[in-house]
Image (cartoon, grey):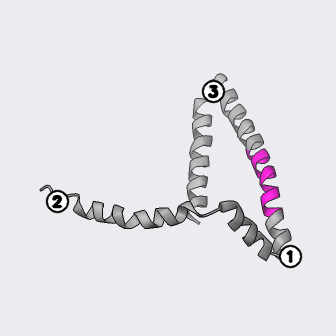
């Protein structure tokens, strides 16, 4: 029974050289080298993707605040069932989107 962890120990020892190799890996240099390979339309598309992410965060926040305000307003007015229905529809929609 004391050899139960032997396979795990062997895997851990096998991973040590990999960890030592990864210690010398410079993320900034690798990223810069990859970005230097992008030129023309590919570089513009990459830049637009990352710069456009800020708008997605902004609109996601605005939509969340509006939905939260709607649900809170319904809750304060005694419309519990409407709020639960909206939440249920949102969950179903999110599950369908995640399944795509």
- Residue 71 falls in which quadrant of the image? top right
Q: Position of residue 42 (x, y in %)?
A: 81, 75
* SS state under label 1: helix
Q: Earlier in the sequence, mark 3 or mark 2?
A: 2
Q: Which residue is mark 1?
A: 41
- Mark 1 Cα shell of 10 Å, populated few (<14), some (14-19), many (≥20): few
Q: Nearer the viewer, mark 3 or mark 2?
A: 2
Q: Do tag 1 and tag 3 residues touch (Cβ < 8 Å)?
A: no
Q: Do tag 3 and tag 2 residues touch (Cβ < 8 Å)?
A: no
Q: Which residue is mark 3?
A: 75
Q: Earlier in the sequence, mark 1 or mark 3?
A: 1
**Structural distance between the alpha carbons of marks 3 and 2:** 59 Å
Q: Nearer the viewer, residue 45 or 5?
A: 5
Q: Position of residue 94 (x, y in %)?
A: 60, 53
**Structural distance between the alpha carbons of marks 1 and 3:** 50 Å
What secondary structure predominates along the stretch shown in magenta?
helix
Q: Residue at x 47, y 62 (%)?
A: 19
Q: Residue at x 49, y 63 (%)?
A: 20
* SS state under label 3: helix
Q: Do tag 2 and tag 1 residues touch (Cβ < 8 Å)?
A: no
Q: Nearer the viewer, residue 65 or 48?
A: 48
Give the farthest residue toward the left. 1
- Mark 3 Cα shell of 10 Å, populated few (<14), some (14-19), many (≥20): some
- Mark 2 Cα shell of 10 Å, populated few (<14), some (14-19), many (≥20): few
**Structural distance between the alpha carbons of marks 2 and 1:** 57 Å
Q: Is residue 8 left or right of residue 97?
A: left
Q: Nearer the viewer, residue 7 or 65?
A: 7
Q: Earlier in the sequence, mark 2 or mark 1?
A: 2
Q: Nearer the viewer, mark 1 or mark 3?
A: 1
The magenta stretch is: 48-60
Q: Which residue is mark 2?
A: 3
Q: Nearer the viewer, residue 21 or 43?
A: 21
């Amino acid at each position: 029974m004391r050899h139960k962890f032997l396979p795990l120990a062997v895997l851990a020892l096998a991973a040590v050289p990999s960890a030592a190799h990864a210690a010398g890996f410079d993320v900034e240099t690798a990223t810069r080298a990859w970005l230097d390979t992008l030129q023309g339309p590919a570089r513009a598309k990459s830049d637009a993707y990352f710069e456009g992410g800020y708008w997605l965060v902004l609109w996601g926040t605005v939509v969340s605040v509006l939905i939260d305000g709607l649900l809170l307003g319904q809750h304060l007015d005694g419309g519990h069932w409407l709020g639960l229905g909206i939440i249920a529809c949102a969950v179903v929609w999110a599950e369908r989107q995640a399944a795509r």
